[in-house]
Amino acid sequence: MCGIVGYIGTETASDIIIDTLRRLEYRGYDSAGIVTIDSGQFHLCRAVGKLKQLEAALSACPQNGHIGIGHTRWATHGGVTEANAHPHVADDKVAIVHNGIIENYRQLKDELVAEGCSFASETDSEVLAHLFAQAADNGLTGKDALQHVMARISGAFALAAIFVEEPDTMLVARNASPLAIGMADGVICVASDAAAMAHLTRTVIYLKDGDIGVLRPGSAEIWDKSGMPANRELIVSSASPIMVDKGGYRHFMEKEIHEQPDAIANTLSAMIDGTGRLTAGMSDVDCDRISHIVILAAGTSAYAGEIGRYWIEQLAGIAVTVENASEYRYRHPAIQRDGVAIAISQSGESLDTLMALRYAAEQGLKTYAIVNVEESSIAREVDTVLPTRAGAEIGVASTKAFTAQLTVLLSLAIRLGRHHGRLSDDKAEALTTLLRSVPGAVGQAINQTEQIRPIAAELKRATSCLFLGRGRLYPLALEAALKLKELSYIHAEGFAAGEMKHGPIALIEEGLPVICLVDNDPLSEKTLSNLKEAQARGATIITIASQTISEEIDFADHNIVINDYDPVLSPLIMAVPAQLLAYYTAFEKGTDVDQPRNLAKSVTVE
Ligand code: G6P
């Protein structure tokens, strides 16, 4: 949520910053901006909209400086305007970029205005520029200036500041929002994630919460929150450079849907040890300890957790609760201290999830993370990482990371079921064999897109629709509804099929699309009855079903049929037609598939 970049070196700073911002655009795309220092003055360029608008503005007035900072914004405080775009400059002395929220900005702004500061934006972030200018006026530089500002602000932040009078220095600070420092010969750079600057350097330092730093080419002095020098480890990042290439597909999302067989296979290989045994990344001691699991996640990752709950409870008999990360720590939950917490996050940076995880750790729970970005904040904080190996996911709507998360969760369910004696060795082996078949089955489902496009062409005209499912397909119905609404802006709700009669059925009117995921399992008859009830009231029925059961659904208006599979795998396989339906509906409607309005991929504010 907002990406920040800084660079001091020998190249043209604006070129490097734009290139790095391009790799951070997934963090927000409401506006973008850059400021460099050249010939003793700031050169500021900002533009509303995507980065390409900024690039167009820059081409009209190229910048030559070797130091600069840049920002891509997801608006929090203040509308989407050029004035609210970062960087913010105060008194032609200092420029800042900020990711996060300065929670006490209102009070600080009032004080600064009373002292004569004039604000050019409605943002919380601009107070930082004025506080740094105030520090400079008081003769404070470097660490002293940072401490002056840190003493005043509260909230979440990753920030970078540059000063006209010190064109070889950048000040940085971090609390809760991510920030990595990259080092190379004669160069220093910063970015919200290491992968965004992996094309520049892989030698990085990750700041810890409360750290402040004074950066110059080739050197980084860092202090911890108590003001003591902090010797932060210089690591060689394993982050792969973020690819900004669609590889021949129309959209990153389309590419990522097609990458799912590989993402699942790669993830599965991390769940299996050298002897071919499914360990799910867990030692026997780990498995012994697990008697209750609380899953902490947001958005699509939370729906993966809900599906995981069905698998883990059914196959391993271990109680699971799934919590919206944003609610967990504030509702003072009753903690089962013999349990473990598992965070699920594609980015590893969702602030809600990070904070919930910290709360769980403070309550004494051992922490795990199912995470796609291995050097992310969440991955670095937990006791054990259970990696998804989906590769970089650029499309804002999660697809391959979701099915990779499901792969880990089903592996975990089988592993725990076997360890705790709920599954015999033979049954666990049979399930592992099924799991190995998933990449192939997902590949087949991807190839069955022909049936989906004409349905999407009709669905695009809907203003509202319902998704239904039972059992493991109920949370997938919630995810399918989320996918459709975030991509096509069509109002969509997911319900447990059996719950329709308890209220939601009142929503049905002539032609309302009701999209149902149907499994070939003992409950399917009940689900089909629920569909008949909806149809009797005028709903247009669309089903997504496997071959055998689809033969019983001759009453549906449209039936998307996929090859038969074992029902235990249903969420993994059925995710594909659900994703494709959302993708093609958005495509038919002409919405921005990869960067839907108002969203960001990595949400680092509460
Ligand atoms: C944002 C994204 C969602 C994502 C959620 C959780 O809201 O738009 O697509 O599911 O964050 O992200 P995470 O990186 O923690 O999985």
Image (tube, grey):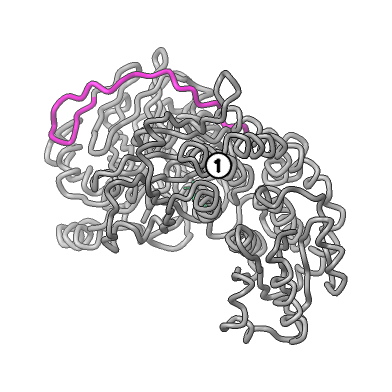
Residue indicated by mark 1: 423
User: What's drawn in magenta, residue-wise?
Assistant: 222-245
Most foreground residue, 382 or 459: 382
Residue 244: in sight, yes or no?
A: no
The three-letter code of the residue at mark 1 reads Leu
Image quarter (top left, top right, bottom left or bottom right) of the C terminus: bottom left
Q: Nearer the viewer, residue 169 or 41?
A: 169
| 134 relative to 194 in the view: left or right | left
Please report the residue visible at 30 percent of the width from the left and 25 percent of the height from the top. 215
x and y percentages locating residue 433 in the rendered image: 68, 34
- State the image coordinates of residue 34 (x, y, percent, origin top left): 45, 40
Percent position of residue 390, x then y: 60, 35
Judging depth in this view, the residue of 537 and 415 nearest the camera is 415
Q: Is residue 260 left or right of residue 44?
A: right
Provide residue 377's location: percent of width, then percent of height.
Answer: 38, 37
Secondary element type, mark 1: loop
**582 within the magenta span:** no
Magenta: main secondary structure = loop
